[in-house]
Image: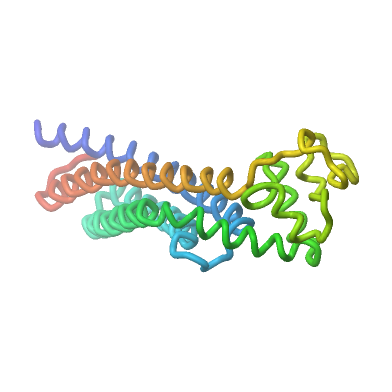
């Protein structure tokens, strides 16, 4: 009876963890989509291994949700095969998350150089491509920056002295970037500001992945305990 009572407790805790895994999965998918949208505007897709991280996060989130559903069915029906499948796939997800966290940490220092390269390339396309212009304008407004290293970078692009995009102005009005006064525009470059923001978010995402992996270890342990109980023939309903 003591063992049966213990397994009831394990089963309850496993249900709690499965709900947490579903929440984690939805969170991972949301974070991955958000990161992909940001990277699409800052770094050319495929430019660096770090740019694949959002895709990995989305895939892991979707797979984790599916695995949590399998685990819920297995725990509810006390099905030996489903619980074994759940434990194996959860172990694989944990390994992928740890690998992704390590990759994020390793490639964190490559974020700013890659962003610098792509930002300057997009600056060259600014006068010729309206979509690129909208993206750069949005970035400069949101992060309150101007140019790659500083506002003087635009002089080489717009072929005019004393000319920057209107999005560089502190108070944006049409034509405010022509014959501007330095005190009326953002002078700090976007590479350091946005690149630093991207780098810090990569580290936060990596830390979150490690935290989720730790919780998944508990799920694997509880699943193995339940599998052992099912195999021994205990009733844990």
On the picture, is 109 further left or further right than 168?
left
Q: Picture coordinates of residue 80 (x, y %)?
A: 21, 56
Q: Picture coordinates of residue 157 (x, y %)?
A: 76, 61
Report the coloring of the rendering: rainbow
In the figure, 116 relative to 6: above or below? below
Q: Picture coordinates of residue 37 (x, y %)?
A: 60, 54
**Residue that extends furthest to the right in the rendered view of this protein:** 174
Q: Number of marks in the image?
A: 0
Where the C terminus falls, by quadrant? top left
**Residue that extends furthest to the front in the rendered view of this protein:** 161
On the picture, is 4 further left or further right than 175?
left
On the picture, is 222 further left or further right than 182?
left
The residue drawn where x is 76% and y is 55% is: 155
The residue drawn where x is 56% and y is 57% is: 115
Q: Nearer the viewer, residue 21 or 210?
A: 210
Inspect this view and state whether residue 113 appears. yes
In the figure, 209 relative to 36: above or below? above
Q: Nearer the viewer, residue 169 or 142?
A: 169
Question: Residue 24: which quarter of the image?
Answer: top left
The residue drawn where x is 88% and y is 40% is: 173
Where the N terminus falls, by quadrant? top left
The residue drawn where x is 21% and y is 43% is: 222
Inspect this view and state whether residue 70 appears. no
Q: Picture coordinates of residue 36 (x, y %)?
A: 56, 56
């Amino acid at each position: 009876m003591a063992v049966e009572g213990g397994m009831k407790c394990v089963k309850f805790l496993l249900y709690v963890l499965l709900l947490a895994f579903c929440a984690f999965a939805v969170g991972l998918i949301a974070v991955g989509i958000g990161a992909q949208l940001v990277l699409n505007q800052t770094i050319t897709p495929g430019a660096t291994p770090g740019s694949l991280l959002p895709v990995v996060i989305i895939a892991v989130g979707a797979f984790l949700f599916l695995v949590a559903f399998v685990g819920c069915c297995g725990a509810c029906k006390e099905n030996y095969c489903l619980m074994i499948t759940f434990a194996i796939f959860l172990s694989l997800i944990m390994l992928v998350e740890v690998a992704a966290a390590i990759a994020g940490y390793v490639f964190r220092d490559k974020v700013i150089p890659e962003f610098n390269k792509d930002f300057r390339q997009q600056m060259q396309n600014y006068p010729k491509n309206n979509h690129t212009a909208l993206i750069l304008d949005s970035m400069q407004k949101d992060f309150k920056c101007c140019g790659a290293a500083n506002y003087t970078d635009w002089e080489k692009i717009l072929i005019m002295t004393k000319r920057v995009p209107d999005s560089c102005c502190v108070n944006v009005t049409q034509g405010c970037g022509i014959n501007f006064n330095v005190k009326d525009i953002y002078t700090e470059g976007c590479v350091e500001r946005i690149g630093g923001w991207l780098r810090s978010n990569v580290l936060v995402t990596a830390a979150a992945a490690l935290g989720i992996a730790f919780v998944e270890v508990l799920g694997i342990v509880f699943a193995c305990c339940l599998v052992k109980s099912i195999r021994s023939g205990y009733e844990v309903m």
